[in-house]
Image (cartoon, rainbow, N blue to C red):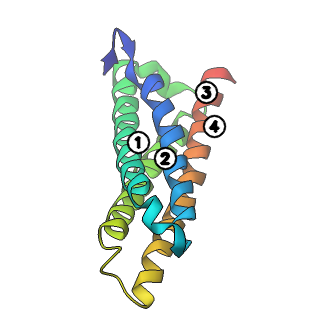
Amino acid sequence: MEILGLPAHPLVVHGAVVLGPLAGLVSLAYLRPAWRGLLRWPLLVGAVAAVVFLVLAAASGESLLESREQLRQLDGMHDHEEGGELARNLTLLFGVLAIATTALQRRLHGLLATLAPVATALAAVAMIVVIALAGHSGASLVWG
């Protein structure tokens, strides 16, 4: 996978490491009921963008490894690859929860109205941590 002759992975990763945590932070602010009306669309759009970029980052990383087998020999590559897969999966979970929470915002009542944003925020925290760890391991491979 290439963009203008360059490997796509280092290019789309920047979107993933910015938009994933940013959407996650919006979901933390969404915990405050008074802000939910204001943050509904930013959370929805941010979650979808995060999912798109994390899926593209994982796919382009796999493509890069297939095209350059010597990269598999680098110390830490396996950890980075596993971290990227976990980041993609957690972002998918976060995306599903964020979409469901925002789509059903006006229909949820009582305990469910509280639990849905909390579950989304918990998935967001896990996603942010794993994106940071996977990003750090990838940056260490390139620059370390």
- Location of residue 105 by image quarter: bottom left
Nearer the observer, 4 or 83: 4
Q: Earlier in the sequence, mark 4 or mark 1?
A: 1
Q: Secondary structure at mark 2?
A: helix
User: Of the residues shown, which amino acid type is indicated by label 1?
Assistant: Leu
Distance from the alpha carbon under mark 4 to that under mark 3: 9 Å
**Front tag of 3 and 2:** 2
The residue that disc 1 covers is 54
Nearer the observer, 67 or 126: 126
The residue that disc 3 covers is 141
- Crowd tier of the residue under label 3, counting other residues whose Cα lies within 10 Å: few below 14, some 14–19, many 20 or above: some
Classify 72 as above or below 114: above
* Pointers 2 and 1 in contact (C-beta within 8 Å): yes
Residue 107, image x, y percentages: 30, 80
The residue that disc 2 covers is 20
Distance from the alpha carbon under mark 3 to that under mark 2: 21 Å
**Front tag of 4 and 3:** 4
User: Of the residues shown, which amino acid type is indicated by label 3?
Assistant: Leu
* Pointers 4 and 2 in contact (C-beta within 8 Å): no
Q: Earlier in the sequence, mark 1 or mark 3?
A: 1
Residue 112, image x, y percentages: 40, 85
Question: In the drawing, what numbered circle is on residue 136?
Answer: 4
- Crowd tier of the residue under label 1, counting other residues whose Cα lies within 10 Å: few below 14, some 14–19, many 20 or above: many
User: Of the residues shown, which amino acid type is indicated by label 4?
Assistant: His
Classify 57 as above or below 128: above
- Location of residue 110 by image quarter: bottom left
- Crowd tier of the residue under label 4, counting other residues whose Cα lies within 10 Å: few below 14, some 14–19, many 20 or above: some
